[in-house]
Amino acid sequence: MTGVDLTTELRRRAEQSAQALMQAARADAERILEQASVELEARRSAMLAKSQREHHAESRASIAAARHESMRAVLVARARMLERVMERVRALLPEACRAKSYQRTLGTEVAQAIEFVGATGAIVQCTEGLRGIIEEALGEDAVAAIEPLADGRHGFVAVGEAGRVKVDGTLESRLERLTPTLVIELRTRVEERPG
């Protein structure tokens, strides 16, 4: 081999080696790029799934908080409505005390209360406008004393001797005893109303 041939051969082999190295480098680069793409897609999918889980968790928490707040608002509104209704009912008690239907049954109620507390030494405290009805119901030979009801309530209170037994027949106490039942009925009626 001559010097020119040797140089040509060396160049050809160098180019072949360079091409082989370039092909191997390209193959490695494509493999690395493919692995990186697969890894990147896996990370992207994992991050997207995590983000969706967090978003769903936040959404559920927000929805639960909104439901809780709306239920609280409904309960507060119901309570306010019931308070207004009961205030209105309390405001009507003086008128109810003057109603003929109440006054017709008052004598019987007072007589039963006196019988319960014991007639001897009994005191009937009543709203001033009811004194005549109660005196008539007790009769002329009544042993119970009649006094004004000083606390501003409406109706009567029968008190036994020495205050040991008491029958509170005021409209306020009756309303107080009926309030739980009335509240349930009012709520039911409000919920049944259309629109």
Image (cartoon, rainbow, N blue to C red):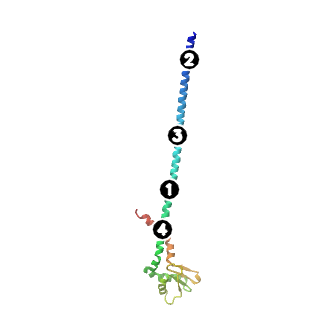
- Residue at (50, 58) in percent of width and height: 69
Number of marks drawn:
4
Marks 4/3: CA distance?
56 Å
Label 2 neighbourhood size at 10 Å, few (<14), some (14-19), many (20+)?
few
Per the image, label 2 sits on a secondary structure element best described as helix
Q: Position of residue 68 (x, y in %)?
A: 51, 58
Per the image, label 1 sits on a secondary structure element best described as helix
> What label sits on residue 82 in the rendered view?
4
The amino acid beneath tag 2 is: Arg
The amino acid beneath tag 3 is: Arg
The residue under label 2 is 13
192 vs 147, left or right, is: left
Precedes in sequence: disc 3 or disc 2 = 2
The quadrant of the picture occupied by the N terminus is top right
Asked whether the beta carbons under mark 3 and mark 1 sit within 8 Å of each other, the answer is no
Pick out the residue farthest to the bottom: 141
- Residue at (53, 37) in percent of width and height: 40
The quadrant of the picture occupied by the C terminus is bottom left
- Residue at (54, 30) in percent of width and height: 31
> What label sits on residue 66 in the rendered view?
1
Label 3 neighbourhood size at 10 Å, few (<14), some (14-19), many (20+)?
few
The amino acid beneath tag 1 is: Ala
Precedes in sequence: disc 4 or disc 1 = 1
